């Protein structure tokens, strides 16, 4: 997965590929939060088993340092991802999880709590599926400004199927979260199209939608593979948050509805 390629491509084409860091303030603060220790580097969330990324050294995307303790499930069953500076080594450390199961055609939905609309320019929050073949077979919803505070912060990207040449399809948009910290993000993939949506609040329908795009040209570029689902929170180019503040998001639910 080469997020940097997308940024460079956007710069060359002069397209707008363009999270105020904060510890999330929410109803979750009222709950007793306990970190779920990963067994064999996995955790359970939303009915799925997720691998917790904790490689040694700096690893892509970014590259960044990663810490398995920065991903946990609380007593409510909500998944937390955090970027924080480790006082023991002075490294900013990121978080990523991905499913052991591979999922195919259907609707993928995340209900997220966090001040996504005002994240620091160096924060990247991704929700996507990915085959492991860089530059192909990937459908992304990313909240990121890619290091430039003036750029758009909502990025939809569809990378072509394996064997298909050409650039990824992408759109960028700007959004804020003026009425609270709850948003819903989803995409529906079929054999010939991917429809992506972002909505205010926690929604199962289309109420309070603030952005949607559909990619279907050419249909042959849409991946047909079943793939793991990834959720990550990381730093663009490995740069520290420009405001020097930790960041946390809470994923209240993930739901996959097969076609």
Image (tube, rainbow, N blue to C red):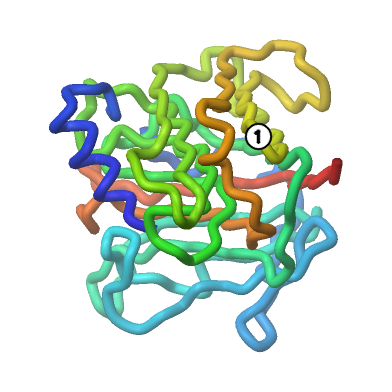
Q: Position of residue 40 (x, y in %)?
A: 65, 88
Q: Residue at image x 13%, y 32%?
A: 12
Name of the residue lying farthest toward the bottom:
40
Compared across the picture, whether 195 is left or right of 249 comes to: right
Query: Which residue lies under the disc numbered 1?
Result: 192
Q: Residue at image x 39%, y 60%?
A: 134
Residue nearer the viewer, 77 or 198: 198
Identify the image quadrant of residue 33. Answer: bottom right
In the depicted structure, whether residue 254 falls above or below residue 203: below
Image quadrant in which the C terminus is located? top right
Image quadrant in which the N terminus is located? bottom left
Q: Position of residue 34 (x, y in %)?
A: 70, 66
Residue nearer the viewer, 250 or 213: 213
Q: Secondary structure at mark 1?
A: loop
Compared across the picture, whether 198 is left or right of 49 comes to: left
In the depicted structure, whether residue 149 falls above or below residue 68: above
Q: Residue at image x 56%, y 48%?
A: 128
Q: How many marks?
A: 1
Q: Residue at image x 62%, y 32%?
A: 194
Identify the image quadrant of residue 88. Answer: bottom left
Q: Position of residue 37 (x, y in %)?
A: 66, 79
Residue nearer the viewer, 46 or 129: 129
């Amino acid at each position: 997965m080469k997020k940097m390629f997308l940024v460079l491509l956007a710069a060359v084409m002069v397209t707008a590929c363009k999270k105020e860091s904060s510890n999330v303030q929410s109803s979750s603060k009222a709950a007793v939060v306990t970190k779920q220790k990963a067994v064999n580097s996995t955790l359970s969330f939303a009915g799925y088993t997720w691998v917790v990324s904790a490689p040694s050294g700096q690893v892509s995307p970014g590259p960044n340092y990663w810490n398995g303790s920065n991903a946990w499930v609380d007593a409510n069953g909500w998944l937390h991802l955090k970027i924080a500076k480790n006082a023991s080594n002075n490294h900013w450390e990121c978080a990523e999880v991905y499913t052991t199961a591979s999922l195919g055609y259907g609707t993928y939905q995340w209900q997220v709590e966090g001040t996504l609309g005002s994240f620091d320019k160096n924060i990247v929050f991704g929700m996507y599926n990915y085959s492991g073949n860089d530059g192909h077979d990937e459908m992304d919803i990313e909240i990121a400004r890619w290091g430039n505070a003036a750029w758009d912060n909502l990025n939809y990207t569809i990378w072509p199927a394996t064997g298909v040449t050409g650039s990824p399809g992408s759109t960028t948009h700007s959004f804020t979260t003026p009425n609270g910290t709850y948003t819903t993000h989803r995409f529906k993939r079929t054999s010939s199209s991917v429809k992506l949506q972002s909505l205010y609040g926690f929604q199962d329908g289309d109420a309070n939608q603030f952005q949607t795009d559909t990619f279907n040209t050419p249909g042959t570029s849409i991946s047909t593979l079943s793939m793991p689902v990834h959720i990550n929170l990381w730093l663009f180019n490995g740069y520290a948050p420009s405001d020097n503040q930790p960041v946390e998001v809470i994923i209240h639910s993930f739901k996959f509805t097969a076609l």
